[in-house]
Image (cartoon, coloured by chain):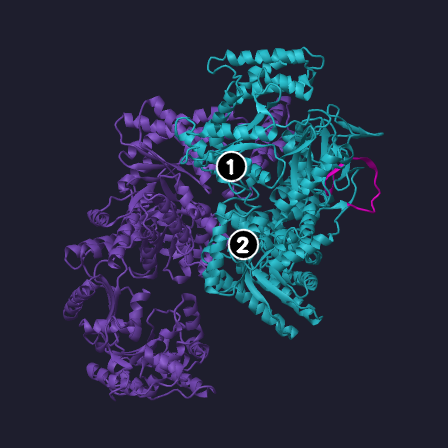
Chain colours: A purple, B cyan
Amino acid sequence: MAKDQEKWVFLFRDGNGTMRATLGGKGANLSEMTNAGLPVPPGFVITTDACNYYSANDHEFPEGLWDQSKAALADVEKQIGKKLGDTKNPLLLSVRSGAPISMPGMMDTVLNLGLNDDTVKGLADQSGDERFALDAYRRFIGMFANIVMGISMSKFERVLERFKAQTENGRDTDLSSDQLKEIIVAYKKIVNSDPDSPDFPQDPYLQLQMAISAVFTSWNGRRAKDYRRVNKIADTLGTAVNVQTMVFGNMGWDSGTGVAFTRNPSTGENVVYGEYLLNAQGEDVVAGTRTPESIQKLQEENKKVYDQFIEITERLEKHYSDMQDIEFTIEKGTLYLLQTRTGKRTGAAAVKIAVDMVEEGLIDKETGVMRVGPNQLDQLLHPMIDPDAEITVLTKGLPASPGAATGQVSFDPDEAERLVEEGNKVILVRHETSPDDFHGMVGAEAILTARGGMTSHAAVVARGMGKPCVAGAGELHIDYGQGIFTVGDHRIRSGDWITLDGSTGRVLLGNVDTVQPELSGDFETLMEWADDMRRLRVRANADNGHDATVARDFGAEGIGLCRTEHMFFGDERLSVMREMILAETTAAREQALEKLLPVQRQDFVEIFKSMDGLPVTIRLLDPPLHEFLPSHEDLQSELAELKLRVQHASTYNDMNALLREIAEKDDLLKQVERLQEANPMLGHRGCRLGFVYPEVTRMQARAIIEAACIVKGEGVTVMPEIMIPLVSVDAELENQRAVVEKAAQDALGEYGMDLDYMIGTMIELPRAALTADDVAKHADFFSFGTNDLTQTTLGLSRDDSARFLPYYIEHKVLPEDPFQVLDQEGVGQLVKMGTEKGRSAKKDLKVGICGEHGGEPQSVGFCHDIGMDYVSCSPFRVPIARLAAAQASLREKNSK
Amino acid sequence: MAKDQEKWVFLFRDGNGTMRATLGGKGANLSEMTNAGLPVPPGFVITTDACNYYSANDHEFPEGLWDQSKAALADVEKQIGKKLGDTKNPLLLSVRSGAPISMPGMMDTVLNLGLNDDTVKGLADQSGDERFALDAYRRFIGMFANIVMGISMSKFERVLERFKAQTENGRDTDLSSDQLKEIIVAYKKIVNSDPDSPDFPQDPYLQLQMAISAVFTSWNGRRAKDYRRVNKIADTLGTAVNVQTMVFGNMGWDSGTGVAFTRNPSTGENVVYGEYLLNAQGEDVVAGTRTPESIQKLQEENKKVYDQFIEITERLEKHYSDMQDIEFTIEKGTLYLLQTRTGKRTGAAAVKIAVDMVEEGLIDKETGVMRVGPNQLDQLLHPMIDPDAEITVLTKGLPASPGAATGQVSFDPDEAERLVEEGNKVILVRHETSPDDFHGMVGAEAILTARGGMTSHAAVVARGMGKPCVAGAGELHIDYGQGIFTVGDHRIRSGDWITLDGSTGRVLLGNVDTVQPELSGDFETLMEWADDMRRLRVRANADNGHDATVARDFGAEGIGLCRTEHMFFGDERLSVMREMILAETTAAREQALEKLLPVQRQDFVEIFKSMDGLPVTIRLLDPPLHEFLPSHEDLQSELAELKLRVQHASTYNDMNALLREIAEKDDLLKQVERLQEANPMLGHRGCRLGFVYPEVTRMQARAIIEAACIVKGEGVTVMPEIMIPLVSVDAELENQRAVVEKAAQDALGEYGMDLDYMIGTMIELPRAALTADDVAKHADFFSFGTNDLTQTTLGLSRDDSARFLPYYIEHKVLPEDPFQVLDQEGVGQLVKMGTEKGRSAKKDLKVGICGEHGGEPQSVGFCHDIGMDYVSCSPFRVPIARLAAAQASLREKNSK
């Protein structure tokens, strides 16, 4: 190599994990593994710089590239003891692209490069399986012709179909060696007769050169460019090319292939968890077509390899200090690691592994806390089968994803999707699942499959979604056509109820009760660590004493949102509420409110007691009043019905009663019409009600303060925070604050008590955020109502978005559902601005968030970053928010 | 005066117009007038500093105040030749407060101070009218007792009522001198028997001292404090006290009183315009109880005073260089100016006066342009009676406010208000109007009164509102009780139609056609000046060729908003539109769109022709699709009706037809239900439609580009700007831009033409403004849709706000209707931010506004200030926007 010549080629052992920009992600990983002393099939990487040179220079290799490649190849040949093009002991290569950022839209892999009419015989001899060798050659020609030379795959498929039709079962595994030979001749003829491309290259070096060019060229192919445009990846990154030795698990019974996790991905137990098949190729394991053996069996079958395997998993965990998910192949007694990556795991496993690894000294506490995805905790909080329930176990499969769920059987993903949309609970039952079934899995409560293992599609997807899954329940006989499955003596039809226990693999008959699980000690440990690390407080949204208690059990440090309107929906209360709404004078309205007062007060008493010592934010009446009235349409059809009945009334009394009813309903209808709004979301609601009807605010403030006095009298420490909703102009808050203060003063006077309480507002309209400095003058605290703020900022009604929002997300116009993950770019600007402006006017302003984003980890991170005091979320998401808050603190610490 | 002593008192001649902070507004004005050589009744001002001292020092006068006051008083006595407390020639004073900022909530005026048991006789002798003197004394005691001493007015009223009851007609003018004397005794008794206050002071100096104290004290009274709080006026300003000589117009037939404008306030003609009454008090003129003489008559009655008057008006206009509205009194042949202020005028007068004064050299062109309130132009654009209409003139009154209007007679302001709310056109007919009638005047088309002059309440208010008014139509006999007026042989009942011509004073029978007036040469002149001065371009919102032509006539420099959906509402088009909406496949949808294409294209052809050489911004389909379908309720009741009819169908054929109709309607109902939205404003509309149904965007883009090609072929210069509505995420615009560009390319290819066109977006959602830098990357222009932006920023549905928005404005929670006047504090922030961010990404981004605010002067000023390129408004408001834009430019220039 000339002194100044650039280094275009890196042997795996010359690179490392930090060289993603030059070697691409895959190349850097393979280098890292090699350097960690792991038995990686040897190979080399051609740099992204070479690709960029190639793109910029009219598809010319840079000077030295080919020479360096040949030198690297010679090194590889020496390591593996095979030679490219050798007819006895042929080296076969895989050639694949690997950009610095993973790009699924890029070029496919070329496998078995190096095969030609001569080397195929060597492969046949070595494997002792001529059919395998010929089949590999046949596939290679097709793959190479298609991917490298650009010839349509359908031409090859037509030939294959013709030959398959001649076999007994019509499958490609039924093809004989002779037939495969004929196919190879036909394949080569397709290539060689193509007018636009050269003949199929028998020279393995030429094959390699062409494959490298093809990878480079693919960087500027339509698919790759589209992918980059959509994902905003720079065109200048370029792709690396990975050239790696092929190893074969099907070279006899001292060969094999498998996948494994270094610890149990479902429970987190520190035991290697994996499956393998001897004399098999990798795809046989993943496909679930042969049921693989547990990795522990390997100890009996090949102790030497097993020991090596165990030693490697330990080395892996030390090197990566995390649980790994690996693919391996044994070729003639030698173990090769094809891939390692951080292993996906259930929430329970994530917690256990994190805590165990801290205790094993592999990682520190902070790393442990960072290791658990906050959303994964959701799974831990999932229900399990009620231990006291009487159950009938239909069968047992693999416990592929934990949690228990109950639902009606559906065999069809389309049907399942529809049923879920109609509000049904569905359990999707399939032979095995594929990506085509995904839409049916999304809404299903749980998934049950008859085939496939812990790493099957159904299992992986279900764990990802935190849904229960029982996989490989082999006793199940499913008949899609009849819509039925039988197991033992049971016949379960589509629509029948079953219950799955994804933690044990049990399939139960009928709708079995489920209960909330106890949280493990590891969970408590992790949460304690997290609590020590976070700055952000976490509160819960709860509207009654029961929910408040649940929230407190989950670690809530207060109530961030108590929605008083939910208290009005009980049957008796609703009728008083309607009386209030339909009142035509202030006096009549006050009379109705007088009846609501003790009811509200009692609700608050319960919440305050549950939250002894913690703050409770109570939002005053928020929704438009017509939400409390019957729907216009219902009333209209009831009226139509009554009018029909009047025509058929048979007695004077009947007639009279009907006419009276009609008159009443007609009256109500008129009231409903009077209150109807074109856009209730933007209508007469929130503090606009309290402003026009101050008596409503007065009643609610009284109920809160009186309840506080009552519980304080009983020794409870009570910290009420009264929240005025939907403020857009500071004067609204000023007005409502005065009403609340007056009512509070009156109540306190009557009870002869003192009380610390706060008055604040929700910031849920853009204008409130934009003028937060003015608003803050009248507020002791802000709570960002990001649900409504998202609706107004995006001009997007949550109720109406279902028709197009999924389409938006699918087309990446929006990266995520803005009602789930806070739109930081847009809505986030207002939240930040509101916080800053608010604090500019009032330095110690307490600021929180109470939209559903308060329990979503990314959004929690944002709230931490902009300096909020607390987030508030649904009780079950409190642990998630606690963990997310800790991680946000750590990220901030680490970025300093 | 000691050397260091502060100057607490200023004679009028020692102050000037710039000393508002020290002398208050009124005091500074009186000083200014005095110094301009105008015959102001002499007096002096006590400073705001004295008030502040008084407030801060336990209601003590500062040292020197009283001495300085007495010295000033002596000076005044010398000037006027009367003495305070003199029994022969008594000086009477008015004492009134005058803060630096006008505060209607402050202390009332004390008039006739200086009267006592002795001086009242002097006044009686001087005026030769004992009744007048006694009545003045009686009033003074009540006023002084009430305002200065805080005794309830009702006590005095009870006494007065008792005495009035003894007279023949029960009016206070019927009271005899003797009765008045008895009343005075009774009044003094009330005061002197009040346990909380001293006796009524006979000493005029003590009266003055007490009155000054009372003014100071009133600064911290409840009324004044409330007023300051609401209007955000600092408490530290303090009020000045104005002490001024009283002059009397009822001192015989060489005395008189009147009001006048220095030019005609209705037409602007340069002729003094006023009214006076000899031997009368000021209130007699304003009240309209005696019909006054035209000022020109004074020339005959008292040439000397008339000449002095004319000389004064000329001096006034030179001094103030604007038309003045003055109050004057003649006391025994001497003319006094009581008040002068800039005269209110009609739009026509404003234009004429401004242009005349520029031509007279009184002011420069820029001042001329600043002199006309942009909203005043609205009046000029008001309709007038169709000259070709056959008319029946009922009577003629004063042409009190120009313009013609037609409506149904109502005699009751409450009824008028209600009728207007119900959508009726009303003409309010009253004897005369008072502030109590205001609510009825607001909605009325025009006002007709039987009494009162050009300066009566009705006339002043109507001119202010730009409504036609005919005042003082003395032939009218109104009977409120019967709801009827008669004039000549005509009997007009409540609810009958009449037509008013406020420019001529004619009252016409029935509903007479009105037409738009020709605009005067002065108007053109002024607009030319304005056009030379403004930077902001002015466009119009127009949806068809006719409106575009009108807009161009009004000076529009392009179309800023053409709403394509308005083009779909014709009957035939609507059915095709429905076909498109109800299409279940893309193919079917495209078929329907194919039918709409030529129709849209033709619309655009017409608009482009009207706007030859000017840009035309066309907004793609914006509203939710269900707006094009029949309403759910209508369909439901139609269905109910049909179902009833089916029960009574008498033949098989009838039955069958009905059942078919039911099935069809049922189908349509389902579609309507499918498209129904909870909050259509925030629903599937704007570019969200175009994104999901790109074929709609494609058709519209094609229609625009094809139309442009067609007219270009005919020699028209066409500049289309295609506007994508309701963008919230930049990717939406990117997507729709691509669709438009592709369609445009295709169309241009077919026509074989080149064309300059732009693609831009409406900024009408907060998120678009917040992320305007991203959005601008895909936009050639921004147009702020401030109607929708106001709705989302305030979370306020325009359709639903009627129930509470008026209440908000009434209670000053919002200063103005944010849908009329741009909410600069809130929405304005987003407009500014959007403009700045947009330009930060694209320096030459064209930015405009197309909400209704584009024709509202304050909002136009804001658009200028933040550097927009243009505003767009309804055609009739184009001149208003042009003038407002010029004024904004001038304000900017003058502030530099």
| Residue stretch in magenta | B385-406
Residue A298 picture quarter: bottom left
- Where B42 sits versus B141, above or below? below
- Where B620 sits versus B281, above or below? below
Is B856 positioned to the left or the right of B297 in the image? left
Residue drawn at (39%, 55%) of the image: A824
Q: Which quarter of the image is occupied by the C terminus of chain A?
A: bottom left
State the residue in front, B637 or B882: B882
Query: Is B483 covered by the magenta stretch?
Result: no
Is A868 positioned to the left or the right of B94 in the image? left
Mark closer to the observer (1, 2) = 1
One can see residue A623 in this view: no
Q: Position of residue A640 (x, y in %)?
A: 61, 35
- Where A424 sits versus A137, above or below? above
Q: Position of residue B571 (x, y in %)?
A: 70, 52
> Mark 1: which amino acid?
Gly
**Disc number for residue B894:** 2
Mark 1 and mark 2, same subunit?
yes
Using the numbered discs, state the Cα–Cα distance from disc 1 to disc 2 in whole angstroms: 25 Å
Residue A350 picture quarter: bottom left
State the residue in front, B690 or B890: B890
Q: Chain of mark 2?
A: B
Residue drawn at (41%, 47%) of the image: A786
Q: Position of residue B746 (x, y in %)?
A: 60, 71
* Label located before the other in sequence (1 or 2): 1
SS for callout 2: helix
